[in-house]
């Protein structure tokens, strides 16, 4: 998907997909960001950002939310202002989960999926979820603060099978 990058300040994670066929349950993908503290960078997240929420300090915000994938361009967009994030946080993991309200749906069952991670005009990573076609959720980015306070980017799409709630609880684990 990409190579490691350092000195990341402000990124945008965007996801797009096609709507479901007429009469079928809606395709609903959600971007989720989990923030981890310096004391437990692989423990439980300090907080989650997803639809209907934002970070307590306003540094991570879901700018666009879609429940259907209808429209042109990217359907969901999240902005992460890592340069403004408190020193109390050492790691931010970003994932995409498919809502499973009406049965079991995987990335392979949804047409024209894509994720793009950008810093300004620079693409850090792009993927179409084809490598995790049987998954219902996937980690798409990991941002880690080094000892100097600079944020680095590790991009790799890692699939997960489960509902969005269990994914959010486990997405930052070392094995996720």
Image (tube, rainbow, N blue to C red):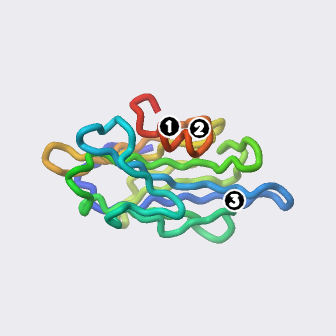
In this picture, is 71 found above or below 98?
Answer: below
Residue furthest out toward the left: 148
Determine which residue is flagged by label 2: 132
Comes first in the chain, label 2 or label 1: 2
Earlier along the polypeptide chain: callout 3 or callout 2?
3
* Residue denoted by label 3: 18
- Label 1 residue SS: strand
Q: Are marks 3 and 1 in contact (CB under 8 Å)?
A: no
For label 2, the SS is helix
Q: Earlier in the sequence, mark 3 or mark 1?
A: 3
Q: Which residue is mark 1?
A: 158
Mark pair 3, 2: CA separation = 17 Å
Q: Position of residue 40 (x, y in %)?
A: 29, 37
Assign the N terminus to one quadrant of the image: top left
Q: Secondary structure at mark 3?
A: loop
Residue at the location (61% across, 37% down)? 162
Residue at the location (33% across, 45% down)? 36
Q: In front here: 48 or 63?
A: 48
């Amino acid at each position: 998907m990409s190579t490691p990058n350092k000195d990341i300040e402000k990124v945008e994670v965007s996801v797009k997909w096609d709507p479901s066929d007429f009469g079928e349950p809606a395709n609903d993908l959600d971007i989720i960001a989990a923030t981890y503290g310096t004391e437990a960078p692989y423990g439980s997240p300090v907080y989650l950002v997803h639809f209907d929420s934002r970070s307590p300090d306003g540094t991570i915000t879901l700018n666009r939310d879609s429940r259907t994938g209808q429209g042109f361009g990217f359907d969901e967009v999240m902005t992460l202002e890592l340069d403004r994030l408190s020193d109390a946080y050492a790691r931010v993991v970003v994932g995409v989960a498919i809502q499973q309200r009406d049965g079991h749906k995987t990335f392979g069952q949804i047409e024209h999926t894509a994720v793009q991670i950008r810093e300004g005009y620079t693409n850090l990573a792009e993927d179409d979820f084809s490598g995790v076609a049987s998954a219902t959720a996937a980690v798409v980015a990991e941002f880690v603060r080094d000892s100097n306070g600079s944020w680095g980017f590790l991009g790799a799409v890692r699939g997960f099978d489960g509902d969005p709630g269990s994914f959010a609880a486990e997405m930052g684990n070392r094995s996720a």
